[in-house]
Image: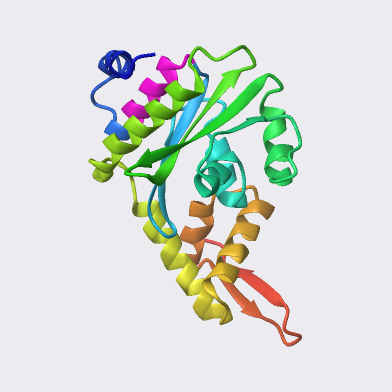
Amino acid sequence: MDPTELLSLLARSLAKIDHDRPWAMRLCQACVDLLRAEGGSLTVSAGLGERAAVSTPGVFEQLEPLQEVLGEGPVHQAMAEDRLVVQRIDRMVEGFPIFSQLAGPVSSDVMLYAVPMRVGGSVVGVFSFYATADPLVRSEEDLQFIADAVGAALLNDLESLDWSEQAQFHQATGMVVAQLGVPPDDALAMIRARAFSQSRSLQAVAVDVIERRLTFSFDEDGDNTERTEEP
């Protein structure tokens, strides 16, 4: 489709969404509506380890946070490899088997599309959405154009995204580094493991660390231990 026509359709979708909602959320919902999808997310990277995301409400809302907890999934792959990634979410995928296993029960008839958002030749984030197994209403070229346009729009208004959770996550990672004397990547792995084992979000575990309800330490044998204080 002609790019001008695509932008016009996107603008029409935006106009139908409540203007009281945050800009990033409105933009995400407009893309989902334009593609006749079931739900979607926008994940933006503002530098190494700096990410913020918004998701449309619904049954698929937790799939993007699940990828963040696991550190794997189509969004991570699309951003790292700068390419469209398509996965049927009930099918085991060698590259991210844990995500495939946990996401599968959500639905057996849904495809996950992760499209890199490119601005100035660089990947600035990923637009991901969930659609039924029916053929897409847009071509891959249209998907890429929409993703790039949305990426450019978001970079012009990064304040519309909530970066507070990312700041808390960095603070919690630094505290675990101090507690265990390990590199940041290892501290991050400990927080991810804790979140995964308790089926909680990274944000929830980070808050526990910051408020000192959860601390990590080594026992006499050098094994990692955790101490959780009841609120």
The foreground one among 95 and 83 is 83
Q: How many marks?
A: 0
Q: Is residue 145 magenta?
A: no
The foreground one among 212 and 19 is 19
Q: Main secondary structure of the magenta part?
A: helix
The foreground one among 133 and 181 is 133
User: Residue placed at 37% from the left, 33% from the top?
Assistant: 148
Q: Is residue 99 visible?
A: yes
Residue 125 screen position, x and y as percent: 42, 43
54, above or below 195, in the image: above
22, above or below 181, in the image: above
User: Residue placed at 61% from the left, 63% from the top?
Assistant: 189
Quadrant where the N terminus is found in the figure: top left
Q: Is residue 211 visible?
A: no
Residue 15 screen position, x and y as percent: 25, 16
Q: Which residues are magenta?
A: 25-36
Residue 126 screen position, x and y as percent: 45, 39
Q: How is the image coloured?
A: rainbow
180, above or below 92, in the image: below
User: Residue placed at 76% from the left, 36% from the top?
Assistant: 92
User: Residue placed at 75% from the left, 44% from the top?
Assistant: 94
107, above or below 208, in the image: above
